Amino acid sequence: MKIWAISNQKGGVGKTTTAITLGGILANRKFRVLLVDMDPHGSLTSYLGLNPDEISFSVYNLFQDRVAGRMLRPEAYVVNTACEGMALLPSSTALATIERLAGVGGMGLVMANSLALLKDQYDYVVLDSPPMLGALMVNALAACTQLVVPVLSEFLAVQGLDRMLNTLEMIARSRKVSIPCTIVPTLFDRRTRASQETLEKLKLRYGSRVWDQEIPVDTRLREASQAGLPPSHYAPASRAVQAYSNLTDHLLQNDPPTG
Ligand SMILES: Nc1ncnc2c1ncn2[C@@H]1O[C@H](COP(=O)(O)OP(=O)(O)OP(=O)(O)O)[C@@H](O)[C@H]1O
Ligand SMILES: [Mg+2]
């Protein structure tokens, strides 16, 4: 089982959109996919038609079970989605309280340990992270076999990126694994100076970690979210889905051989 974390501590850069689109594309390619919503705002959960304010079981329960010393049983909290081959481990608003437990020993590995129990059930897990470098993002970084960092194609996009990448390196060192990382320029508009300049700046600073293509601005993505369907299912021929499909190819090639 491979685990792709979609993270960036900046808000509104396309993390959730990337998670649902990659998930849909992987499901279309007949992989068994589990989406995990680790954002207390629950955007991915709402996207798929569930209300994070009313949900009874979610990622939160994994942390609660860990604190209470109970056995982890992630399968009890997974729900099916309307898309074949795509399941969801939803978020709930209670997840916001987890950040307070950041200092409690062993809490950083709750997601990694939970997903390890599901390794025979899914081929790919896609983790959607919250826009902050806290306990939940650390859990995502500690669980993933590959990291995808969507970066908005506009000025100031690189702010905070170093801190997150340093944290990833620290976690990777302690796990004694190398975690491939791909920086993905999102909401790219070829005609604007901001998009072009950001791309140049990213390439200068992060070199080969920057994907050599971009995700274009595409209104079909917003329509898909309003329809509650993965863009891959709602608008398979759209420019953005084509770009995400190329990104999927790239990530599949980057997957470490084991895990
Ligand atoms: N390529 C794109 N073209 C047009 N709109 C997009 C694109 N990618 C994302 N969006 C839109 O931009 C908004 C922010 O995207 P998204 O929710 O995926 O970001 P996020 O990083 O998950 O945000 P947050 O940090 O709040 O969780 C959404 O309304 C989404 O539909
Ligand atoms: Mg989001």
Image (tube, rainbow, N blue to C red):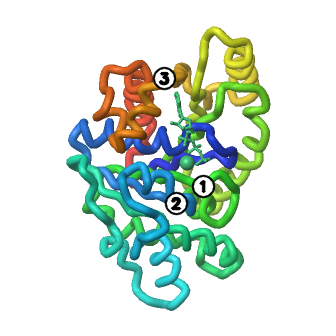
- The amino acid marked with disc number 2 is Met
Type of amino acid at the residue the image marks with label 1: Pro
Q: Is residue 97 left or right of residue 119?
A: right
Q: Is residue 123 left or right of residue 53?
A: left
- Please determine whether, in this image, residue 146 is positioned above or below residue 144: above
Give yes or no for contact between labels 2 and 1 (Cβ–Cβ under 8 Å): yes
Question: In the image, is 222 to the left or to the right of 173?
Answer: left
Mark sitting on residue 38 = 2
Mark 3: give few (<14), some (14-19) or many (20+) Cα within 10 Å: some
**Marks 1/3: CA–CA distance:** 23 Å
**Secondary structure category for the residue under label 2:** loop
Q: Is residue 128 visible?
A: yes
Q: Nearer the viewer, residue 256 or 222?
A: 222
Q: Is mark 3 within 8 Å of ligand 1?
A: yes
Residue tagged 3? 218
Q: Which quadrant of the frame does ligand 1 lie within?
A: top right
* Quadrant hosting residue 98: bottom right
Across and down, in percent, residue 69 comes to 49, 90
Nearer the observer, 80 or 150: 80
Q: Circle 1 is placed at which residue position?
A: 130
- Give me the C-alpha separation between circle 2 and circle 1: 6 Å
Instruction: Give coordinates of residue 71: x percent, y percent.
Output: 40, 85
Q: Is residue 89 above or below residue 4?
A: below
Assess whether mark 3 and mark 1 are in contact (beta carbons under 8 angstroms).
no
Task: Tell me where residue 246 appears, x and y as whole percent.
Answer: 40, 24
Classify 10 Å Cα crowding around label 2: few (below 14), some (14-19), many (20 and above).
many
Mark in the foreground, 2 or 3: 3
Residue 21 visible from this viewpoint: no
Residue 89: image quadrant is: bottom left
Precedes in sequence: disc 1 or disc 3: 1
Mark 1 element type: loop
